[in-house]
Image (tube, rainbow, N blue to C red):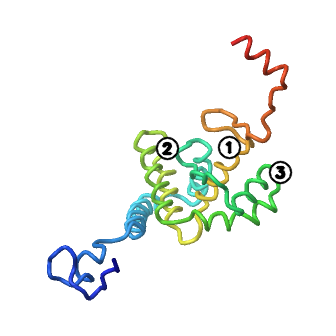
Amino acid sequence: MSAIGRNQPCRCGSRKKTKHCCGVPNGPSETDLARAFLASEAREAARRLICLPEDELDEIFADVLDLPEQHLSLQLPLPTVLTPEYEGLRQAIEDDDPYAFHEHIEAALRRVDSPEQRAGLARNVLELSEAGTIDPDVTDAALLDLDSPDAPAFMRASVFRALSVSVGASCTPAGLLIVPPESAPLPSSTEAGSMSTTV
């Protein structure tokens, strides 16, 4: 069965052309909704922060970069299979190589930086703020950063923290250290036998 053309009558029976009926999605896209949400939240945040002195604003924006370390929901979820950009970044973090890190971070951010991801982080920040775990000024600064046209520093920190936890370079916000599978010691055959007899 061939696809219906845009100028043919719509299959729903409305007698309208497909392009004016079911063939065109109605309303704004998810990307447009995410951009509008970010712009609205950032505009309100800017109104609240504008009266603060510059040195206080600098401290607040520095606190934004610590948020992914303090809250797991503010770390971007990593893909199941790491792309070459992510793998290079993961290796740079594991090797504690700042030059390789800066070489790979931009490419890794381009893979994940989208209005939908930014809006998801913004919603998580707002949720934590409403629960009283994030200072309102820090929340406002995070919202402003997420609405910036460039790759937000908050997203960089989020990707960095998620990858450093995954390679065991830092702990989760709960204090757990994740040992990557390839570096976890495997029990020897005698240890495995003794473990099975004790269970």
Cβ atoms at labels 3 and 1 below 8 Å apart: no
Report the side of 55 relative to 42 (left or right).
right
- Most extreme residue toward the left is 14
Q: Earlier in the sequence, mark 3 or mark 1?
A: 3
Q: Would you identify the image quadrant in which residue 109 lies?
A: bottom right
Where does residue 63 sit, x and y in percent of width and height?
Answer: 59, 50
Which quadrant would the N terminus be assigned to in this image?
bottom left
Q: Amino acid at mark 2?
A: Ile
Dot 2 and dot 1 residues touching (CB under 8 Å): no
| Rendered location of residue 118, percent (x, y) | 50, 60
Q: Secondary structure at mark 1?
A: helix
Q: Position of residue 51 (x, y in %)?
A: 46, 60
137 or 139, nearer to the observer: 139
* In this view, 32 is above or below 138: below
| Residue that label 1 marks | 165
Q: Which residue is mark 3?
A: 95
- Label 2 or label 1, whichever lies nearer to me, is 1
What residue sits 49% from the left and 43% below the top? 134
At label 1, the amino acid type is Val
- Residue at point 61%, 60% (across, down): 153
For residue 149, side relative to residue 69 (left or right): left
Give the mark count: 3
Task: Sort mark 2 into few (<14), some (14-19) or many (20+) by Cα contacts within 10 Å.
Answer: some
> Which percent across, then down, holds residue 166?
68, 45
Mark 3 surroundings within 10 Å by alpha-carbon count, few (fewer than 14), some (14 through 19), many (20 or more) = few
